[in-house]
Every structure is written in C-alpha cells, then in structure tokens.
Image (cartoon, grey):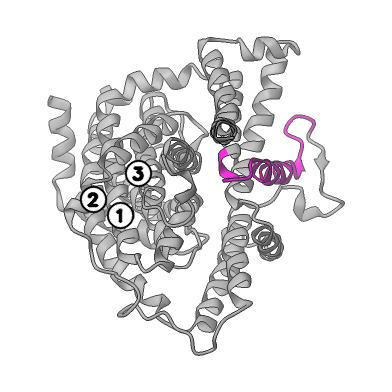
Amino acid sequence: MENFLIGIQALLSIKSLLAILAGVTWGTIGGIIPGINATIAMALLLPFTWGMEPQVAVMMLGGVYCGGEYGGSIPAILIGTPGTNAAAATVFDGYEMHKKGETGLALYLSLYSSVFGGLFGAVCLMLMAIPLAGIALAFGPAEYFLLALVGLTLICSLGENNILKGIWAGLFGILLSFIGFDPFAGTPRFTFGILDLTSGLEMVALMMGLFAVSEVLRQAQNFDINDKYKFDKKNDTSMPKLSVFKKFLSVNIIASVIGVIVGAMPGAGATVASFLSYSYFKRSSKNPDSFGKGNPVGVAAPEAANNAVTGGAMVPLLALGIPGSNSTAIMLGALIIHNVNPGPMLFVDHPEIPYGIFSSLFVANIMMIFVGIVCIKCAVKITAISKPALFACIVTLVFTGSYAFNSVHFDVLVAFLCGIAGYFMRRMNLPHAATVLGFVLGYIMEANLRRALILTRGSYLKVFLNSPITVALTVIAVISVLWPLVGPLRRSMKVQKTY
C-alpha cells in the first residue's frame, strides 16, 4: 500500500498530468496518421524526455503507447486504411459499418472498447505482474513456434466460406515473410539481386498497399464524379447510448484477457492479439458469415485486445527488464537514458516508477475518452468530400507514410505493388487478413522452429512434446484446423437426412 501511495503521489503533480495528456494526444494523432504507429510516435518523443524526471518521462511514453494503439482505428473505420498494424483487423468490419451508415457506432464502439481494454490491462498489470512474468519466462523456442502455428491455423477461418482460399492467401503471406536474409545462414533469399529486398518487405508499406491502395483501385472502377459522402443524410455519427455499449461487455472482457496474455509474451505484440481475438469471436459466433460485412463485434474484439496489450507488455519490461513489444523497447531505452535499470529490483530501488506507471495507465485511458471524442469529431469530416479528392488524399497518405517510416523510396514501390496484388485478391475473393497473418507469423514460426530443432537435435517429436505448454498448444492447433470443417460437415449431414 505504501508503494501504491508513492506511485499516486508521483502521478498527482501538474508535470505528470500534463505529460500524460500530451502523450495521449500525440499518440492518438500518430495512430491516426498511416505509417506512424505507437512505436514511431514514442521514438519521436523520446528526445524530449531527457530533461524530465524518470517517472514523468515514462508516464508520458505510457500515454503515447495507449493513444497510439487506439488512434489507428479511426482511419481504419473511415477510409479503410489501418493507421497502425494492430488496427488491420478493425478494417474488416469497421469500414463496412461506415459504408452502411453506422459510422458513429463503429467509431465510438472502438473508443469504448479501447478504453475498456486499456483499463483491464492496467488492472492485470497491477495485480499479476510477477505471475505473468513467470509464464512469459516459461516460453522457449518450441513454445513460440507452436504459438505462431496456432495463429497460422486461424487462416482456415479467415477464408470464410472457402477454406482453401484462406490457406492460399496465408501461404502467400508466409512466402512474402521469407524475403530477406536467412535468420540463421545470413544469406539473402528471394531477393533476385535487388539490394532493397535484403532487409525484407516493410510491414507498414505492405499493409497500406493491401488495404488502402487496393480499396482505392476497386472503388475507382465505378464512381460518379459528383458522388459525395453526405453524413447528414446517410451516416449516423452521433454517440450511441450507454446501453448499446453494455451489449459488448462480455466481448470486451474476453478480448482483453487475450490481449493481456499475448502482451505478456515478448515478441507477440498488439497485431497478433487483435487477429487472435478477431478470429476467436468469428469462430465462436453463431453467424460467422456476418464478420467482414459490418458486425460490431469485429470492431470491439480487436480494439479491446490490442489496447489490453499495453498492460500485458509492461509485465516483462518492469519485472524482468525484457521489452514485450517494440513500444516497450522504447520505454526500456528511456529508462536506461535516465540511469534506471528495469527488473525485479526496480520495485525496491525506484518504486515510484513501476507504481507510477500503474496509476498513470488508468489516468491515460480516462484521458483517452476525451481526446478520442475530439479526434473523432475532427476526423469524421475528412470523408465528407468527393470521392476523387478522397482517393487522392488516401493515396498521398499511403505513399507518404510508406516513405516516412524508413525514409526509403523502395517502400513506396512496395506499397504500390502490394496494392495491385490486393486489388486482384479482392477480385478473386482471397482474404487480405490471411495474407497479413501469414506475413506477421511466418518469420516467428520459422525462426523459432529452427531454434527448437537445434535444441532438440533435429527431433520434431520433441519439439511438439517439449513441455505441457507445447502439448496444449499442439492440441489447440489441431482443433483449430479441424473446427472449420465441422460446420460444412454438419450441413452436409443434414442435407443427406432430408433425402
């Protein structure tokens, strides 16, 4: 209790509160701009923390982390372009809800779920920092390989009515993840002699090309030059009543649990959490075909999960000194800059820092409500223009964001080519989500499988039976593959009975 009071005392100062507010605001704006995610927003703000006290600096970066994970959902809903990688799953139903005129429900449901997930993650961080860190330590290469394998089996459900299409799209994403240097041999592969490909494809450029450029190309085929989005007549942008949000309470709780668990595992991150959450609810739904067509659960689930990651990712950082994500790696750098060594002794030597973070995450998520409402009211006006102007703005943001991420011109070409590939994927009804999931998890699976095989001296059986965790994950993977086949099998049996 004394340590909590020390943390609250560090929080309740004008410096700390203003720093958190500035962090949340900048993080949300950074998330809205495609190509600038929470990690980049934190990195840009890092030099400004040098003259601050350590606890104030970390509190501000925590506010950026929270705001950045939420902000990416706004462009995902309004223009079908995820502002951050973690908001990619929000595009599938959020953008469809916007096109159906349910813009207000999608935007405010995203805000509500993000705040809920962030608060849930903060509570879990406060109560279970050390136990969750112990679970994270139990994960070795075999466990991480099977965790990625479980994620890849979710591809089966992303193919909607055609499982084979989901598998093909996922394999395409895995193939793209192989481009670059071999993680063990250190030799370039699938680069075709192109120097820019040796470092692999950039995730930001690939995702913005697949989602945004392909959507612009699709809509540009048939449009009226005078066609405009008329929000006053077609789109409801008002805030729904509180009773509407209560319907999604159970969804937010389950999604937040997924987010905290994934966040506590170093290297997984918010993108993996949002896709796992989205796929879980799609599989468990009585009407899975409604996902991707404007189902509100498809907005609530990934947003609650990717914001709950912020609390989970802090667990290994504070308790073990191991960053759980790219964003917490920036926070690790901030602590080191201020001569603070994270780890178990941090709770003893500098209790104001970890307990100040516990308190600041609650305040940051509360502030995010007001910052989010202001950003929504401003951002919602950008689509009230003619389609040609909107298309030009989207393409400009995509190519600018692709270049700004690494300041490499080749990434602009990657976004353009991925946009063309995404356009043809839309024509063939191949799910973009499966490609993104394959790209995200392909490298994780390959690298950890090869590490596990080295440790087991080439025994695949020992990889799958390495520990109780690997056995459990193997069973989950098998069920994930077979489960999508159960529905069609039941329907075929019913048809046979009718005859």
CA separation in Å, label 1 and label 2 = 7 Å
Q: Which residue is labeled 2 in the image?
A: 245
Amino acid carrying label 3: it is: Ala
- 19 relative to 438, above or below: below
Q: Which residue is labeled 3 in the image?
A: 304
If you read the primary sequence from the N terminus, does the residue marked by circle 1 or circle 3 appear first?
Answer: 1
- 17 relative to 230, above or below: above
Residue 135 on the magenta segment: no
Q: Residue 195: x percent and y percent? A: 80, 53
CA separation in Å, label 1 and label 3 = 10 Å
Left or right: 171, with 281 as reference point = right
Give, as a single range, the part of the protein colored magenta: 157-185
Residue 208 appears in the rendering: yes
> For residue 382, what is the image quadrant?
bottom left
Q: Which residue is labeled 1 in the image?
A: 109
CA separation in Å, label 2 and label 3 = 13 Å
Crowding at dot 1, Cα within 10 Å, few <14 / some 14-19 / many 20+, comes out as many
Which residue is rendered at x = 51% and y = 51% of the image?
85
If you read the primary sequence from the N terminus, does the residue marked by circle 2 or circle 3 appear first?
Answer: 2
Are the residues tagged 2 and 3 within 8 Å (C-beta)? no
Q: Secondary structure at mark 1?
A: helix
Amino acid carrying label 2: it is: Phe
Question: In the image shown, does 356 or 181 lie closer to the viewer?
Answer: 181
Residue farthest to the front, as pictured: 499
Q: Residue 24: x percent and y percent? A: 30, 55
Question: In the image shown, does 296 or 122 lie closer to the viewer?
Answer: 296
